[in-house]
Image (cartoon, rainbow, N blue to C red):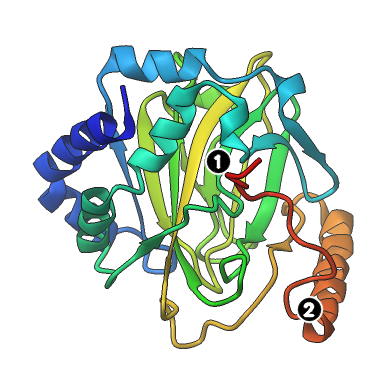
Amino acid sequence: MNRIDLANLIFEKLDSEKESLKFQFRNSDSGIGYLFVDDVLPTDIAHKIAKVFPEPNQMLLKKSLRENKYVAAQMNLYHPLLEETIYAFQDKKIVEIIGDICDIQNPIPDENLYAGGISMMGKKQFLNPHLDNSHDKDRNLWRVLNLLYYVTPDWKEEYGGNLELWPNGLDQKQITIHSKFNRLVIMETHNSSLHSVSPVTFDGYRRCVSNYYFADSPLLDSDRFHVTSFRGRPENKMADLVLRADTFLRMALRKVFKKGIKENPHVYKKDQ
């Protein structure tokens, strides 16, 4: 399967459920617009995507107080089906129909996979509550949508590794979205779209294909530039204090170094 074939299949699914997806997105919590659609691709294809994921030791381990997960963006190092799947979600007709569903004018996919690509989380791995960084790698476009396609067969909600949305802040109960096999989740990203991934409790790996869409303008008039900004989970007040301080320091550095002290390595360098 190439990206065009995959995009055609994804489009058929989205188009067949477009009105219900519009309703779902419009009537999701007003703090963070989101939707999910199941059985995005034929089951046999979704299984093939899961099967060709690399082993953890072939990916980059990001481990800190902020997060603990495996990621990869240099897609020419892996099975071609993974790259084709990622870029299927960047096909013009897919971008346009998702923009229509989410009422976003002229969304722009990210061919550089800045913070996108593939990821895996195993037992005890997690992603703490955070706001995604507000811009693309060149700080020209605003990040507006996060697309997460889950491809772990038989992944149960009780295994953890689920997306959590915190539209009312960490003092209120989160919305949990099961990272179900062959499910696509789309969520808004803006200055209030706090989200996380719950710790994995199962002895296995939750696999995800990620894309971000950008736009010329932010979703909210109140949006301002920010780095990826982490918080501690509600039950971990000490981690929250440390991560708040970490965000403050990194924001201060960005006021001096507009594009950071060094280039973010998590991009797809197609000439390598």
The structure residue drawn at horizontal position 48% and vertical position 18%, both measured from the top left corner, is 50
Disc assigned to residue 247? none
- Residue 130: x %, y % from top left: 66, 59
Circle 1: element type? strand
Q: Is residue 260 toward the left or the right of residue 177 in the image? A: right
Q: Is residue 19 toward the left or the right of residue 148 in the image? A: left
Cα distance in 3D space between marks 1 and 2: 25 Å
The structure residue drawn at horizontal position 43% and vertical position 68%, both measured from the top left corner, is 31
Give the residue at mark 1. Answer: 117
- Residue 114: x %, y % from top left: 59, 54
The structure residue drawn at horizontal position 27% and vertical position 73%, both measured from the top left corner, is 105
- Residue 89: x %, y % from top left: 35, 44
Give the residue at mark 2. Answer: 254
Q: Amino acid at mark 2?
A: Arg
Q: Is residue 115 above or below residue 161?
A: below
The structure residue drawn at horizontal position 57% and vertical position 34%, both measured from the top left corner, is 75
Q: Is residue 27 visible?
A: no
Q: Is residue 15 above or below residue 242?
A: above
- Residue 54: x %, y % from top left: 62, 19
Q: Amino acid at mark 1?
A: Gly
Q: Is residue 150 visible?
A: yes
